[in-house]
Amino acid sequence: MKKPLYQEIEIPEGTEVTIKEGEIVVKGPEGENRRNLNLGKLEIELKDKTIKIGHKNASKREKKQMNTLAAHIRNLIKGVNSKFEYKLKICISHFPFTVKQEGNEIIVKNFLGEKVDRKTNIPEGAEIEINKEIITIKSIDKEKAGQAAANLERVTRIRGRDRRIFQDGIYIINKAGKEL
């Protein structure tokens, strides 16, 4: 059944939002974030300190698109006000290994006694800080911070051995403020 559906997003003080031709730009104290929006049939309107998204004859499809788009916009706004932070833990039980950062590349040496170093790239815009056994990733873009954390977890994935015994690796312990 089609009915009018709209959702409003509040813009906090100190945040500036502009919408032009399917692209949204959000500026705040931490920096600037931009994203191309796939609006489809949805209408988006910027009034004073609110963003109104919706459709006058919305079906289930428009409702799904509206909720997804609203979540992306909320993440953009939240990111420019306070950075998203992911924490990872370096777990060592069998072989001591080292984690180093060189530019936008992370190098893991001596993982499970391997002679060849394991390497992974970090997306631009993600800041990495390595403190002994805790790695902290910060970014204004939630997707870049999450991808950086996933890359670090993936680079130390164990193949061909029992994961219950060989628990060495880098694991996510905190995702954007949520404990795991």
Image (cartoon, rainbow, N blue to C red):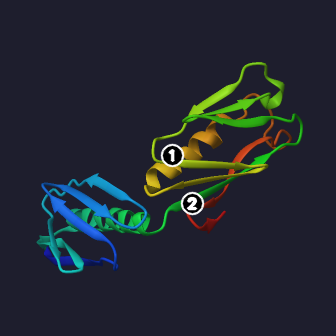
Residue beneath the point at 48% across and 41% down? 123
Instruction: Return the residue at label 2.
Output: 85
Q: Looking at the picture, which amino acid does disc 1 mark? A: Gln
Does 116 sit above or below residue 175?
Answer: above
Residue 159, image x, y percentages: 72, 30
Instruction: Return the residue at label 1.
Output: 147
Q: Quadrant of residue 68?
A: bottom left
Residue 64, image x, y percentages: 28, 64
Q: Is residue 171 left or right of residue 76?
A: right
Q: Looking at the picture, which amino acid does disc 2 mark? A: Glu
Q: Considering the numbered disc 2 on the image, is that residue within a helix, a strand or a loop?
A: strand
The tag on residue 99 is none
Residue 130, image x, y percentages: 70, 48
Which is more foreground, mark 1 or mark 2? 2
Residue 176, image x, y percentages: 55, 63
Does 73 sit above or below residue 87?
Answer: below
User: What is the CA distance from the residue labelled 1 to the residue labelled 2?
Assistant: 12 Å
